[in-house]
């Protein structure tokens, strides 16, 4: 392990001040939130920055509130706070359940949702489910504020679409309708997940027909992946869809394009997609409607 090089921590009082610090330091600077991933990478010499902009000093970044049919979660909200939030449990219980599975209690108590997404670690859970839920990110930079869809935010392993002076301020998640059912499952035998799979299904009044579906697979690829062709196979009468699950899983695995690594062979990961799509599909359909 290489010794951690000296760096300077800057503590802005506002988001505008944080973006100015980031713009001034350019490639030599990096945003610092929970630091669970960033500091570890710097300690191992994988990343080197001379300046860290610590936005934990900026107030009102840990709010969880309901806004216009969306659940708004401040970027500095920890995984533990999301896991324990009554509002999250009531409105989007699958999100609280997913957060309960992130790493361990120490990481969940320190790591933040904004830091997790900004680091874009491919073996991570939140981005998989948030993409499936249709979430967006609110971002502020020197050019102003904008909204970034989750499928545009993460572009590659450890890479986002954000400019060097951009700060992710909040995550906006549409509150699922009563007709929607969601599930998130993961498979993990080492420190990080080998596979994460999320599904969101819209049901008709009878509960026997699926009118719309989203499915996301992650952790076996450089970023979370969707397949419109796979999702089309998840629409229709339940009995018909169940027969089409293997084909849908194959399409999801194809777009994820897994490779051989320490987590397992590509063939093994493709097999896992089939197993966990079937399990997630059954779990989503067995979930009672939100009260």
Image (cartoon, rainbow, N blue to C red):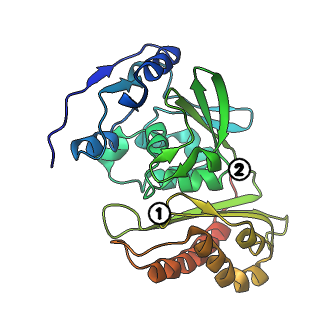
Earlier along the polypeptide chain: callout 2 or callout 1? 2
Q: Between residue 85 and residue 249, name the one nearer to us.
A: 249
Say whether residue 94 is visible. no
270 above or below 162? below
Image location of residue 22, percent across then percent down? 44, 23
Image location of residue 41, percent across then percent down? 29, 45
Q: Give the number of callouts.
A: 2
44 above or below 279? above
Image location of residue 101, percent across then percent down? 42, 57
Outermost residue on the right side: it is 205
Q: Between residue 117 and residue 242, name the one nearer to us.
A: 117
**Residue under the image location 63 percent in, 21 percent down:** 143
* Residue count near mark 1 (Cα–Cα under 10 Å), binned few <14, some 14–19, many ≥20: many
Image location of residue 132, percent across then percent down? 64, 56
Residue where numbered disc 2 is placed: 176
Quarter of the image where one finds residue 168 = top right
* Residue count near mark 2 (Cα–Cα under 10 Å), binned few <14, some 14–19, many ≥20: many
Of discs 2 and 1, which sits in the foreground? 1
**Residue under the image location 28 percent in, 39 percent down:** 39
**Residue under the image location 69 percent in, 66 percent down:** 227
SS class, disc 2? loop
Outermost residue on the bottom side: it is 243
Q: Are marks 2 and 1 in contact (CB under 8 Å)?
A: no
Outermost residue on the front side: it is 27
Question: Would you say 270 lies left or right of 211 here?
Answer: left
Residue where numbered disc 1 is placed: 219
Question: Would you say 85 lies left or right of 250 here?
Answer: left
Say whether residue 156 is visible. yes
């Amino acid at each position: 392990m290489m010794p951690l090089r000296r760096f300077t921590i800057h503590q802005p009082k506002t988001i505008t001040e944080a973006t100015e610090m980031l713009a001034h330091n350019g490639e030599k600077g990096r945003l610092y939130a929970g630091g669970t991933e960033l500091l570890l990478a710097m300690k191992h010499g994988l990343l080197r920055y001379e300046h860290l902009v610590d936005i934990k000093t900026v107030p009102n970044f840990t709010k969880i509130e309901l806004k216009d049919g969306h659940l708004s979660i401040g970027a500095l909200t920890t995984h533990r706070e999301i896991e324990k939030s009554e509002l999250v449990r009531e409105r989007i219980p699958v999100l609280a359940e997913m957060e309960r599975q992130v790493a361990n209690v120490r990481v969940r108590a320190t790591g933040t949702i904004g830091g997790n997404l900004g680091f874009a670690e491919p073996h991570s859970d939140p981005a998989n489910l948030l993409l499936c839920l249709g979430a967006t990110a609110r971002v502020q930079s020197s050019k102003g504020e904008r909204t970034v869809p989750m499928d545009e935010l993460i572009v590659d392993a450890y890479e986002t679409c954000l400019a060097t002076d951009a700060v992710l301020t909040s995550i906006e998640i549409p509150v699922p309708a009563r007709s929607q059912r969601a599930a998130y499952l993961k498979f993990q035998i080492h420190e990080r997940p080998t596979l994460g799979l999320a599904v969101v299904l819209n049901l008709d009044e009878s509960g026997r027909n699926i009118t719309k579906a989203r499915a996301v697979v992650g952790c076996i690829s450089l970023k979370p992946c969707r397949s419109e062709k796979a999702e089309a196979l998840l629409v229709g009468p339940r009995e018909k869809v169940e027969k089409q699950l293997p084909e849908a899983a194959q399409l999801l695995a194809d777009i994820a394009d897994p490779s051989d690594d320490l987590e397992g062979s590509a063939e093994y990961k493709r097999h896992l997609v089939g197993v966990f799509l079937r399990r997630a599909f059954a779990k989503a359909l067995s979930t009672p409607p939100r009260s």
